[in-house]
Image (cartoon, grey):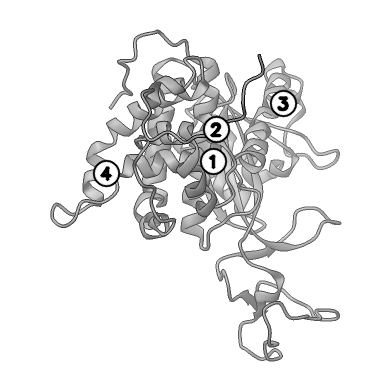
């Protein structure tokens, strides 16, 4: 018999939020990892807040919500709050009850310098990485390094002369501006929206935009990111950031793979003096990598595994929403990059770790 299309709202529900989430949903396993990491950061969070005054929203809930924003490519905090209001999966993951009120989107702006600073984001990143190291999923010998451009949250129209000698700013919300015939460079011009962004391009025939550069060092065993640096977009930034990360992470006797952009005497010779093998892709002419190194089996293997770091950059730009940053200033962009790479490592760990049915698991302190 055909049923009637009767629509009647219920005042009460007798099914718990926990029962509505499928047992095999990947967020269940991810929450085990995230809860362990956040529990180990309890002392870090305590230092960020006063011991007196009105209780705030738990930082653990805010970070879980921001993690969902990265994983599900939610465009803005406004959309994130809309999703959190009616999406039961999001409510369960963040830790809100089915009847709990969601927050105003401005709570993220008010807590951004506290919870998404570069220091706290690096702490979160390091503790996620500690899980992989504890499970022996990270190589301590072979690494790859690369950098990628991040478009700044500023337009060409904001890039004006520093001395203010240019024409007056046209009236209107989005006025027409003619830049033809005007030579603009970082030496004479600066963005009024984001002064730390730099006009930069990599390829000869590509367009110059206001950008930052984020750099990543990955290990070659499972492609996990082990270090991240975000810098202003300059011609020497990739080499300088790579040297900084290598000094922190790569031991003597290890190897570092890189693309042709790193085939420079200062970089290759610097690694050789540190007793680190420079497995850098060679230029056709004038390469700093000697032929003996290029003929080795380890060199060929490093070049093959080097491309795995590009998967991480592709993920943070397409899924993580970091193709164009939503924040202004190098410090905030650096924090966002670290958090996105931590989310990438978490998704990799879901496939690499063998989970037991026992939920009592916590990250190492």
Marks 1/4 in contact by CB < 8 Å: the verdict is no
**Which of the two discs, 1 and 4, labels the residue nearer the N terminus?**
4
Q: Nearer the viewer, mark 2 or mark 1?
A: 1
Residue that appears at 47% across and 28% down: 251
Q: Give the Cα distance between marks 2 and 1.
A: 9 Å
Q: Quadrant of residue 29?
A: top left
Q: Which mark is residue 45?
A: 4
Residue wearing tag 1: 70
Residue wearing tag 2: 344
For the C terminus, the quadrant is top left
Vertical side of 143 occupied by 215: above or below: below
**Which of the two discs, 2 and 1, labels the residue nearer the N terminus?**
1
Neighbourhood count class around disc 3 (C-alpha, 10 Å): few under 14, some 14–19, many 20 upward: some
**Which of the two discs, 3 and 1, labels the residue nearer the N terminus?**
1
Name the spot of residue 157 as percent of width and height, x first. 70, 75
User: SS for tag 3?
Assistant: helix
For the N terminus, the quadrant is top right
Q: Nearer the viewer, mark 1 or mark 4?
A: 1
Residue that appears at 62% across and 21% down: 3
Do we see residue 246 in this rendering?
no
**Which of the two discs, 2 and 4, labels the residue nearer the N terminus?**
4
User: SS for tag 4?
Assistant: helix
Vertical side of 188 occupied by 332: above or below: above
Give 84 or 176, whichever is nearer the viewer: 84
Q: Quadrant of residue 64?
A: top left
Marks 3/4 in contact by CB < 8 Å: the verdict is no
Neighbourhood count class around disc 2 (C-alpha, 10 Å): few under 14, some 14–19, many 20 upward: many
Q: Which mark is residue 229?
A: none
Residue wearing tag 3: 303
Q: Give the Cα distance between marks 2 and 3.
A: 22 Å
């Amino acid at each position: 018999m055909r049923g009637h299309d009767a629509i009647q709202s219920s005042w009460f529900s007798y099914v718990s939020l926990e029962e509505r989430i499928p047992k095999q949903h990947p967020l269940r396993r991810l929450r085990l990892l995230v809860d362990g990491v956040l529990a180990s950061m309890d002392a870090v969070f305590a230092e960020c807040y006063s011991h007196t005054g009105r209780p705030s929203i738990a930082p653990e809930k805010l970070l879980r919500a921001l993690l969902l924003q990265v994983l599900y490519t939610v465009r803005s905090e406004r959309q994130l709050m809309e999703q959190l209001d009616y999406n039961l999966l999001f409510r369960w993951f963040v830790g809100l009850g089915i009847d709990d009120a969601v927050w105003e989107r401005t709570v993220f702006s008010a807590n951004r310098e506290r919870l998404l600073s570069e220091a706290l984001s690096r702490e979160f990143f390091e503790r996620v990485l500690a899980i992989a190291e504890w499970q022996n999923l990270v190589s301590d010998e072979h690494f790859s390094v690369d950098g990628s451009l991040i478009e700044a949250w500023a337009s060409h129209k904001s890039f004006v002369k520093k001395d203010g000698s240019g024409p007056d700013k046209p009236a209107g919300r989005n006025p027409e501006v003619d830049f033809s015939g005007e030579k603009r460079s970082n030496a004479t011009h600066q963005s009024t929206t984001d002064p730390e962004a730099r006009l930069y391009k990599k390829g000869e025939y590509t367009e110059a935009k206001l950008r930052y550069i984020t750099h990543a060092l990955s290990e070659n065993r499972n492609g996990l990111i082990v270090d991240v640096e975000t810098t202003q977009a300059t011609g020497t930034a990739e080499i300088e950031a790579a040297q900084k990360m290598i000094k922190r992470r790569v031991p003597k006797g290890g190897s570092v793979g890189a693309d042709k952009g790193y085939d420079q005497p200062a970089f290759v010779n610097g690694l050789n003096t540190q007793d680190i093998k420079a497995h850098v892709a060679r230029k056709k002419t004038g390469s700093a990598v000697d032929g003996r190194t290029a003929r080795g089996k380890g060199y060929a293997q490093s070049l093959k595994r080097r491309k795995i770091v590009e998967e991480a950059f592709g993920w943070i730009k397409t899924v993580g929403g970091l193709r164009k940053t939503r924040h202004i200033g190098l410090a905030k962009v650096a924090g966002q990059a670290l958090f996105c790479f931590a989310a990438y490592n978490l998704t990799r760990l879901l496939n690499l770790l063998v989970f037991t049915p026992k939920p009592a698991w916590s990250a190492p302190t």
